[in-house]
Amino acid sequence: MKKKFVLPVLFASVSLVACNGDGSSSNGSTDTTVSTTNTTTTGTDTAGTSAATPAANATPLSDMDRMFVMKAAMGGKMEVDAGNIAQSNAANDRVKAFGSMMVRDHSQANSELMQLAQSHGLTMSDSTDKKMQDHMQAMQKMQGKAFDKHYMGMMVEDHNKDIAEFEKAANGAQAADLKAWAAKTLPILRMHKDSATAINKVIK
């Protein structure tokens, strides 16, 4: 029997986990509502299954794991959207390059996470609420140095929060494949944070 859950999800920076929709830096939580379908199947436990090769009969995720997946997915979408804006609105070439890296790395991570979620019967919407949409629209109106400072400050704060969340999942996720994905993604997030911190220090 299929059970449908509609869960309100706070939009995270978890840099993969996001920013406040009011144009300020992230507080690490999402402001989006995500519809999910958690399907209980009769297959075997797929602990250790690769995110790139989802199993058809994986067990459902625990509430804690499911919440992390949804927050990480929404945070990752924010990173891609903001990175695309950075490539067109930033004045500093290093900020533009950072935005390009965000789009590339988070698109890859998002794809892996979506496959992993689907392998556990979890289907997520990629839509965002009005608050996040308003924040992205506000960033689109920023140009040059004002954009650079806002964006890079947000990226430093977001990635600090992301790393803390991913460390928890890498150490405590109940699903082995989710735990492995979080551990694999952590070095990328740490590299992003280091790069964002360095750029934020030099831009004026």
Image (spheres, helix red, strand yellow):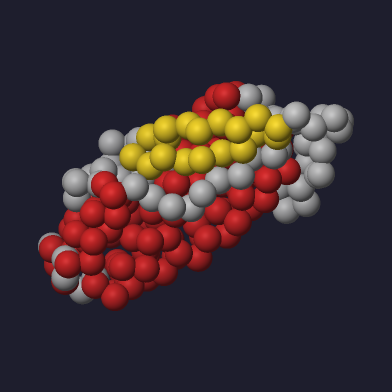
Q: Is residue 53 visible?
A: yes
Q: Is residue 158 visible?
A: no
Q: Residue at x 78, y 41 (%)?
A: 49
Q: Residue at x 42, y 33 (%)?
A: 8
Residue 56 percent coordinates (x, y): 81, 44
Q: Residue at x 51, y 49 (%)?
A: 125
Furthest residue in direction front, as rendered: 1
Foreground: 81 or 150? 81
Q: Left of 114 or right of it: where is 45?
A: right
Q: Left of 179 or right of it: where is 72?
A: left
Check the image and report above or below for 23 versus 42.
below
Q: Left of 194 or right of it: where is 62?
A: right
Q: Residue at x 78, y 51 (%)?
A: 53
Check the image and report above or below for 129 versus 149.
above
Foreground: 178 or 195? 178
Residue 129 percent coordinates (x, y): 34, 47
For the N terminus, the quadrant is: top right
Residue 86 percent coordinates (x, y): 30, 67
Which of the 4 quarters of the picture holds residue 87? bottom left
Residue 106 percent coordinates (x, y): 50, 57
Foreground: 191 or 152? 152
